[in-house]
Image: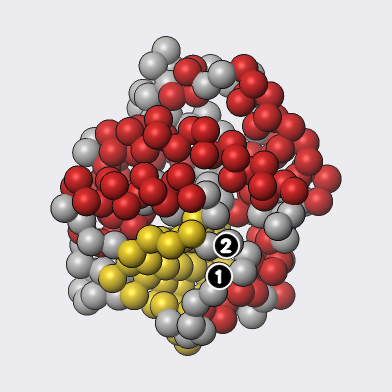
């Protein structure tokens, strides 16, 4: 495994329990409906679909979509995140499948999924081109990728955060490691999402679209879930 992947997995392992509690609160908040409104722009809701949540973390997207009647599988490289996802699914009475797996090399059957979703993952992948190619093979013809992310390696750390924001409780050592991970990844990344559009086209995707306004809809409130870095949605068809 790449050294940076090992570091990222270790970082999230240390945050898994606290992160899981925040995602449960988000699931039970009005953010639930805001996220679903975004999904319904890209994913049909009139039938049950096979959906893969890549970099599922503690399972937030997987649980949102499972509740809508979809058959969802969530994968993540961090074992502690997957453990939390499984526990949360049981506590909420939601059925979803969770597996420890590398997002760049998912060991899954080709052409198995109607949709692939992901949130705040792709910026961490040292071989994003390989990941997009792998995901293209996992989608059924006409399937859709819906990626919510931001150019985190170039984010502005001077932006204010709410007093109750989750990042306020992260240790200085973890903050330093987060910044070091960004420093490691930044030289190999071009500005996003323009770079993603290039890589997706090279991977065989078409109908590639970017929505930069999603950030204002999801994070209109300056609350504990607030993200100061403008996220985008990039969707693409297989």
x, y percentage for residue 72? Answer: 33, 66
Q: Residues within 10 Å of mark 1 (few under 14, many from 20)?
A: some
Of all residues shown, which one is farthest toward the right?
A: 187
Tag on residue 106?
1
Q: Quadrant of residue 115?
A: bottom left
Q: Residue sitting at 68 percent across and 61 percent down? A: 128
Query: Is the residue under label 2 in contact with that under label 1 (CB below 8 Å)?
Result: yes
x, y percentage for residue 146? Answer: 47, 62
Q: Residues within 10 Å of mark 2 (few under 14, many from 20)?
A: many
Of all residues shown, which one is farthest toward the left?
A: 93
Query: How many numbered circles does the render carry?
Result: 2
Q: Residue sitting at 52 percent across and 49 percent down? A: 78
When the figure is inspected, residue 149 is found, relative to residue 101, above or below; the finding is above
**What residue is disc 2 on?**
103
- SS for tag 2? loop
Q: Quadrant of residue 218?
A: top left
């Amino acid at each position: 495994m790449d050294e940076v992947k090992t570091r990222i997995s270790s970082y999230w392992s240390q945050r898994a329990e606290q992160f899981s509690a925040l995602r449960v609160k988000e699931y039970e908040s009005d953010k639930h409906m805001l996220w679903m409104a975004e999904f319904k722009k890209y994913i049909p809701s009139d039938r049950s679909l096979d959906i893969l949540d890549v970099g599922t973390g503690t399972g937030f997207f997987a649980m949102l979509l499972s509740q809508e009647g979809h058959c969802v599988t969530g994968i993540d490289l961090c074992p502690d995140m997957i453990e939390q996802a499984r526990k949360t699914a049981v506590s909420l009475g939601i059925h979803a499948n969770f597996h420890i797996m590398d997002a760049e090399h998912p060991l899954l059957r080709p052409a198995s999924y109607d949709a692939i979703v992901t949130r705040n993952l792709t910026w961490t992948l040292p071989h994003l081109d390989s990941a997009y190619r792998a995901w293209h093979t996992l989608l059924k013809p006409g399937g859709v990728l819906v990626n919510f992310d931001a150019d985190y390696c170039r984010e502005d750390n001077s932006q204010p955060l709410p007093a109750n924001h989750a990042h306020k409780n992260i240790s200085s050592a973890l903050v330093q490691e987060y910044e070091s991970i960004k420093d490691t990844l930044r030289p190999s990344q071009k500005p996003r999402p323009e770079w993603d559009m290039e890589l997706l086209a090279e991977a065989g995707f078409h109908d590639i679209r970017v929505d930069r306004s999603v950030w204002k809809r999801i994070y209109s409130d300056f609350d504990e879930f607030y993200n100061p870095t403008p996220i985008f949605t990039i969707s693409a068809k297989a």
